Image (tube, rainbow, N blue to C red):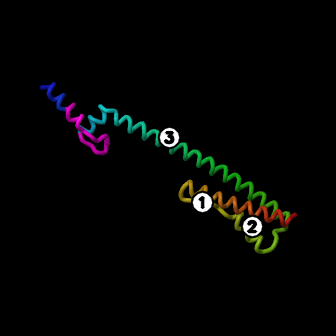
């Protein structure tokens, strides 16, 4: 009798086509365990997590680097502003806008994009201020 039950289970698991544990069911579970499909899915998911973590770490490093670069550019702009006495009203307003800009973003990608735009704007302003002082 036990032999018959074991053979029946093996037969039914061999006929089982799903390896998705979300599909549930006893036979799906037995099939997933015996074929190694669960282990394969776990390994794949762990790989996806590691890839996402590496991507997040790289984004965080880029954000820190961009924040540092922007802070240096703002300091340079302050020094240039002091050297040129602020320039005309339009230039002074542009300086204030750049210095008071706080780039944000709902996601790390959006934050990095906003930082890169602020850096680009600050570089352009710095170049214009260098022309005024030179």
Q: Secondary structure at mark 3?
A: helix
Q: How many marks?
A: 3
The relative height of residue 121 versus residue 26 in the rendered view (above or below) is below
Q: x%, y% of residue 104?
A: 60, 60
Q: Secondary structure at mark 1?
A: loop
Q: Secondary structure at mark 2?
A: helix
- In the picture, measured across the screen, residue 61 lies left or right of residue 10, that is right
Tell me whether the residue at label 2 lies in contact with that at label 1, contact meaning CB atoms closer than 8 angstroms. no
Range of residues picked out in magenta: 9-25
Q: Residue furthest right?
A: 134
Q: x%, y% of residue 106?
A: 54, 59
- Mark 1: few/some/many CA within 10 Å (<14, 14-19, 20+): few
Q: Residue furthest bottom?
A: 89
Q: Where the N terminus falls, by quadrant?
A: top left
**Quarter of the view holding residue 26:** top left
Residue carrying label 3: 50
Tell me whether the residue at label 1 lies in contact with that at label 3, contact meaning CB atoms closer than 8 angstroms. no
The relative height of residue 9 versus residue 106 in the rendered view (above or below) is above
Residue carrying label 2: 95
- In the picture, measured across the screen, residue 47 lies left or right of residue 123, that is left
Q: Is residue 19 magenta?
A: yes
Q: Where the C terminus falls, by quadrant?
A: bottom right
Query: Which is more foreground, mark 3 or mark 2?
Result: 3
Tell which circle, 1 or 3, labels the residue nearer the N-terminal end. Answer: 3
Residue 54: numbered disc: none
Tell which circle, 2 or 1, labels the residue nearer the N-terminal end. Answer: 2
Distance between the Cα atoms at labels 3 and 2?
Answer: 42 Å
Residue visible at 71% across and 64% down? 98
Tell which of 8 and 133 is nearer to you: 8
Tell which of 96 and 126 is nearer to you: 126
Residue carrying label 1: 104
């Amino acid at each position: 009798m036990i032999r018959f039950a074991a053979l029946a289970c093996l037969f039914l698991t061999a006929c089982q086509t799903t390896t998705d544990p979300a599909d549930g069911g006893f036979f799906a579970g037995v099939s997933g365990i015996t074929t190694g499909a669960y282990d394969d899915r776990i390994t794949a998911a762990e790989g996806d997590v590691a890839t996402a973590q590496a991507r997040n770490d790289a984004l965080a490093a880029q954000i820190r680097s961009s924040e540092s670069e922007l802070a240096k550019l703002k300091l340079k702009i302050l020094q240039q502003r002091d050297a040129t006495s602020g320039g005309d009203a339009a230039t002074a307003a542009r300086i204030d806008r750049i210095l008071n800009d706080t780039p944000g973003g709902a996601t790390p990608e959006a934050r990095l994009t906003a930082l890169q735009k602020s850096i680009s704007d600050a570089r352009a302003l710095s170049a214009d201020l260098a022309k005024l002082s030179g």
